[in-house]
Image (cartoon, rainbow, N blue to C red):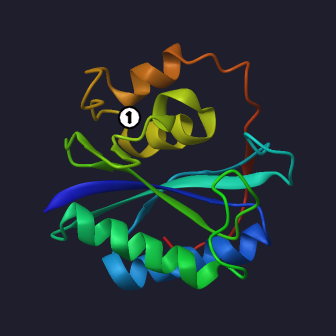
Amino acid sequence: MVQVYVGVGSNIEPERHIRSGLAALRRRFGLLTLSTIYASAAVGFVGDDFLNLVVGFETEWTVQAVLAGLREIEAAHQQHGGGPKLAPRALDLDLLLYGDLVWREAETRIPRDEIVRHAFVLRPLAEVAGDRRHPLLGSTFAELWAAHDQSRETLTPVMLALER
């Protein structure tokens, strides 16, 4: 079994799409570990705030199968096709970590570069995987969060009733 972490985000009817996306992830991958949900401003474009969290799960699936499963769940939530990446999203699922795998293929990077760039990824990842080490940097995610410039992005915890 491999431990996997996925970033989940939405800024189009985010409560509905996050609930639905988590239900789809549970059906596909089983038991999920959930971080706190955070509201944060859109990055890279002007748009409504996002709700973001990180989910963790164990799987026997290959990295390619996990990526394909995430794309299928995402596609089922998009009303007008995928559209550009830096645009409003009904559901955005990003594979952040697949065990300790370091993988670079086309536009896919594992671990995701956004982990250390954005508080809306790093903070929830540090919550659910604080003792794990970044496969390239060697620091734990808790250490990376403690060293992160937390003044650049405002994160607001959001209470949303979810199944754990």
Q: Residue 40: give x, y in percent of width and height.
A: 75, 43
Q: Residue 31: give x, y in percent of width and height.
A: 34, 73
Q: Residue at x 86, y 54 (%)?
A: 48
Residue 138's place in the image compared with 97, above or below, is above
Q: Residue at x 62, y 16 (%)?
A: 149
Q: Residue 7: give x, y in percent of width and height.
A: 50, 53
Residue 110 image-quadrant placement: top left
Front residue of this view, candidates 18 and 156:
18
Q: Residue at x 55, y 36 (%)?
A: 123
Q: Residue 99: give x, y in percent of width and height.
A: 21, 48
- State left or right for residue 101 relative to residue 150: left
- Read off the residue under disc 1: 130
| Secondary structure at numbered mark 1 | loop
Residue 64 image-quadrant placement: bottom left
The N terminus: image quadrant:
bottom left
Front residue of this view, candidates 153 and 45:
45
Residue 4's place in the image compared with 142, above or below, is below
- State left or right for residue 92 relative to residue 56: right
- State left or right for residue 88 relative to residue 62: right
Q: Residue at x 17, y 58 (%)?
A: 2
Q: Which amino acid, by three-letter code, is at mark 1?
A: Gly
